[in-house]
Image: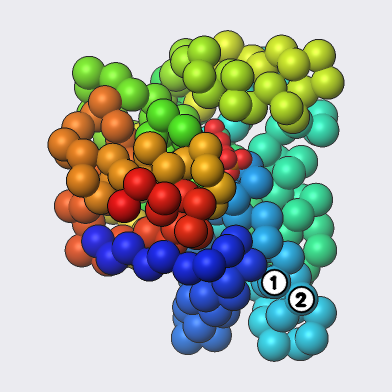
Amino acid sequence: MKLIILENAQQIAEQVSEIFIEQVNAKKNSVLGFATGASPVPTYELLVKAYEQGKLSLKDITTFNLDEYCGIPASCEQSYRTFMFENLFGKTDVDPEKVNFLNGNAADFAAECREYEGKIAAAGGIDIQLLGVGVNGHIGFNEPSDKITDIPFAVELTDSTKQANSRYFEDGKVPDYALTMGIGDIMRAKKIVLIATGDSKKNAVKAIRDGEISSQCPATFLRLHPDAVVFADKAAAALL
Ligand code: GLP
C-alpha cells in the first residue's frame, strides 16, 4: 500500500481523476468500482470536466457501486443510485445499461448479494475500486466487526456511521440497514484508491498506516493489497 499526503482535497482529486482517465484511455471497457459520500465528489467533478472537454469517454465502462441503503426508494435524493447519476453518470456518457447497484429493496437480500457477486465476476472483476473511509475505518459499509466479509451482504449500520451520514437526510434519520460489497470484493479489485480528507478522518488514516490489520478497522486490510493507494490531505494526515 502506498500513502500519498497532499495539501488539500483538490490536489487529491487531480491525481485520482488522472488515474481513472489513464485507466479508461488504456482500456475503454474498464470495470470501475465507485463510491459515494463527500470524499469522491471533487474527483467526479474533474471526470465530468474531462468528459466535457472531450478528453474522456465513459460510454464503454461497466460500473459497480460499493453499497446502497436498504428500505429507501432507489429514486429518492439520498439513494446512492441518485447520488451517482447526479454527480457522474448523468453528466457524462456512462451507459445506464452498464451501471450496477445493489438493490436495497430486494425481497431476498442474500440472493441479491449472490447475484451482484456473480455480475462482478462475469464482468472480469474490478479494475479500479474507489473508496472513501468512515470515521470508524469502515470501507463501503463494512463496519468494524469480528468477521471478515467476502461477498456482498446486508449490514446493520453502526451509530457512528448513522451519525456521520445523518447530514444527508432532512429528518436526520439514516436507514438502519444497507447492502455492501464485502472486504473480499474490494480486495479482489486490481487497484484500490482510497481518499481521506478532513480532520474527522485523522484517526482512520492513522489506523490505516499504523494500526493492527483487523476487521475491527476494515480499511487496514488495504495494507495487504499489492496495488492500493491511499490519498490523505494534510488534515486527515495530522496524526502521522
Ligand atoms: C458512507 C459510505 C462510504 C463512504 C463513507 C465516507 O458511509 N458508505 O462508502 O466512504 O460514507 O463518506 P464521506 O466521504 O462523506 O466522509
- The residue shown at (38%, 37%) is 203
Ligand 1's image quarter is: top right
Checking the image for residue 46, the label placed there is: 1
The scheme the figure's colours follow is: rainbow
Q: Is 49 placed left or right of 100 in the picture?
A: right
Choose between 80 and 132: the one closer to the eye: 132
Q: For the residues labelled 2 and 1, say whether their Cβ atoms are less than 8 Å apart.
A: yes
Q: Quarter-wise, where is residue 81 in the image?
A: top right
Say which amino acid is labelled 2.
Lys
Query: Quick check: is the Cβ at mark 2 less than 8 Å away from ligand 1?
Result: no
Q: Position of residue 142 (x, y in %)?
A: 39, 30
Say which mark, if any, is on residue 182: none
For image coordinates 73% across by 44% down, the residue present is 83
Residue at image position (29%, 20%) is 145
Residue at disc 2, secondary structure: helix
Res. 115 in view: no
**Residue 16 percent coordinates (x, y):** 52, 70
| Label 1 within 8 A of ligand 1 by Cβ | no
Label 1 residue SS: helix
Could you tell me if residue 156 is visible in this image? yes
* Residue annotated with mark 2: 49
- Image vertical order of residue 30 relative to residue 40, above or below: below
Give the percent coordinates (x, y) of residue 84: 70, 49
Q: Is residue 97 left or right of residue 192?
A: right
Query: Left or right: 207 with respect to 34?
Result: left
Kindly identify the residue that appears in the image at 80 percent across and 58 percent down: 90
Residue type at the position of mark 1 = Leu
Observer-nearest residue: 25 or 238?
A: 238
